């Protein structure tokens, strides 16, 4: 009989009985668990790639205004701000026979599976908008809110540096699947006849667009199965009292302590590190530069292969040897310079303003090197400051802050491109490259915020609750 959450696993002599189910709250876990627990990140990255690239091309069938495209694409940011924080907070304040995080993952990703099935079939803009809203709601309800606290409850502090590298590898492999295999099939149309004998002579039409979305649906369905059959949550020794959500109480819980306020400051630093053109980047490559969707996918894949074979091994070597915050500071500085240098190069050094593919790859590598290494250094550091019973709440606060800021920042790039293009070339095409100037300004703000956090960190007022708690973590069941 499968144990319910909070109970000890029954003893067994077989390898499978010793390895499964995977429990949270352990002082050390098998590395197989770390690898398997990276799979939801693989699936989420595929869903995010579909949202950021495939969905842009799907929207282009109905609308061409860049501000409207970024607005529709930013629905997920609104849910980052409205839905995910509530789910993360709520997961700290409930307990069910299924645990406190898993129910949200199972329900949300089941809904995401359905959205992925129906999204490429939308016949009108209004139907597409409904599918996008359901898609983004499900992603934030089932992943963005509950996943991070569940992940860091599963992975002990001393294993997190290498675990984050493995998780990042899952992200890269997912992006390679999307860019090298799926994206190039987007415009393909496959026709044929059913061969099952049920309705002889019936024709079917499978488009590459359907293939992209339905591959994502399969990946999501496997996450639902993993959460149901392989993962269990250990019941905390002391559950927080059941409280009703109130805006004032929620804000006091988030911002009442200096330690949490300082951690939330890192949210903007992280946001500025990853800021970019977003859903306008595919249009920069395919419309302004005139390259194909397939070449766009290949350009992205070169970056990913360098990340797999160079950046991740390098990060694996330094992640537990150097001061993680110092690594982040260097990374965010280099990341801030990249968009300014890229814009200056395209604007003043390239004939016709169209760089060669190898030049695009070079600037992308600059950016990804800084972003990947700095991001991998920062992520495990943040949760070293958070106790287990606060992981959902602090993740909620980070999502709340990030969602509010991202809603402004990412919509701002679309408005910047629209009005900058109109100002520089009234009546002409959109200059997507001009968005790099906007990204540079966001990076400057991140540099300032990073220095503020560094000053407080040096004062010694921050406490690493996560590491202290690890000494009291439960041993694995016998």
Image (cartoon, grey):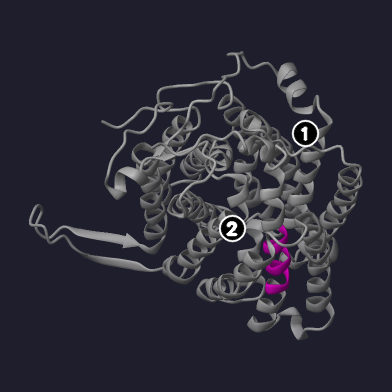
Query: Which residue is rendered at x = 82% and y = 63% of the image?
Result: 330
Q: Main secondary structure of the magenta part?
A: helix
Disc assigned to residue 162: 2
Eyeballing the image, is 302 above or below 80? below
Query: Which residue is rendered at x = 92% and y = 47% of the image?
Result: 455
Rendered location of residue 163, percent (x, y): 56, 54
User: Where on the picture, by quarter, is residue 195?
Assistant: bottom left
Rendered location of residue 238, percent (x, y): 57, 19
User: Where on the picture, by quarter, is residue 388?
Assistant: top right
Which image quarter is the C terminus in? top left
Eyeballing the image, is 145 above or below 313? above
Q: Is residue 368 magenta?
A: yes
User: Where on the picture, by quarter, is residue 469?
Assistant: top right
- Of residue 298 and residue 65, the one placed in the foreground of this image is 298
Is any part of residue 422 visible from this angle?
A: no
- Callout 1: SS: helix
**What residue is shown with label 1?**
260
- Callout 2: SS: helix
Rendered location of residue 311, percent (x, y): 64, 70
- Determine crowd level at label 2: few under 14, some 14-19, many 20+ residues with C-alpha closer than 10 A: many
Rendered location of residue 15, percent (x, y): 30, 50
């Amino acid at each position: 009989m499968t144990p319910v959450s909070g109970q000890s696993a029954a003893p067994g002599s077989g390898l499978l009985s010793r390895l499964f189910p995977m429990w949270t709250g352990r002082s050390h876990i098998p590395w197989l668990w770390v690898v398997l627990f990276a799979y939801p990140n693989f699936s989420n990255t595929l869903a995010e790639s579909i949202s950021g690239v495939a969905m842009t091309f799907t929207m282009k069938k109905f609308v061409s205004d860049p501000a409207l495209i970024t607005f529709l694409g930013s629905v997920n940011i609104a849910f980052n701000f409205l839905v995910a924080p509530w789910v993360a907070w709520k997961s700290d304040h409930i307990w069910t026979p299924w645990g406190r995080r898993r129910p949200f993952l199972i329900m949300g990703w089941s809904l995401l599976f359905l959205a992925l099935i129906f999204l490429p079939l939308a016949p009108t803009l209004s139907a597409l908008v409904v599918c996008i809203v359901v898609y983004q709601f499900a992603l934030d309800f089932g992943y963005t809110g509950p996943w991070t606290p569940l992940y860091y409850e599963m992975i002990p502090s001393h294993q997190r540096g290498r675990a984050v590298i493995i998780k990042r590898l899952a992200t890269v492999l997912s992006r390679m699947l999307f860019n090298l295999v799926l994206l190039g099939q987007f415009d393909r149309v496959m026709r044929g006849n059913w061969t099952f004998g049920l309705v002889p002579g019936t024709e079917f039409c499978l488009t590459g667009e359907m293939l992209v979305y339905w591959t994502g649906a399969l990946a999501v369905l496997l996450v639902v199965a993993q959460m149901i059959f392989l993962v269990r949550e250990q019941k905390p020794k002391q559950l927080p009292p059941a409280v009703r959500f109130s805006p004032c109480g929620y804000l006091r819980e988030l911002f009442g302590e200096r330690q949490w306020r300082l951690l939330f400051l890192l949210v903007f630093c992280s946001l500025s590190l990853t800021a970019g053109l977003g859903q306008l980047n595919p249009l920069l490559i395919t419309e302004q530069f005139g390259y194909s969707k397939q070449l766009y996918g290949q350009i992205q894949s070169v970056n990913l292969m360098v990340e797999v074979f160079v950046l991740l091994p390098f990060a694996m070597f330094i992640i537990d040897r150097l001061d993680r915050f110092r690594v982040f500071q260097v990374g965010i500085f280099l990341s801030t310079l990249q968009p300014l240098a890229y814009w200056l190069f395209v604007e003043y050094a390239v004939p016709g303003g169209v760089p060669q593919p190898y030049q695009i790859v070079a600037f992308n590598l600059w950016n990804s090197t800084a972003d990947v290494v700095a991001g991998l250094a920062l992520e495990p550091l943040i949760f070293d400051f958070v106790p287990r019973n606060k992981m959902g709440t602090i993740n909620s606060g980070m999502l709340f802050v990030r969602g509010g800021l991202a809603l402004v920042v990412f919509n701002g790039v679309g408005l910047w491109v629209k009005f900058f293009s109109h100002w520089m070339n009234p009546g002409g095409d959109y200059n997507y490259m001009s968005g790099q100037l906007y990204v540079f300004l966001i990076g400057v703000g991140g540099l300032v915020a990073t220095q503020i956090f560094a000053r407080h960190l040096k004062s010694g007022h921050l406490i690493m609750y996560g590491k202290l708690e690890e000494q009291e973590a439960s041993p694995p069941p016998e």
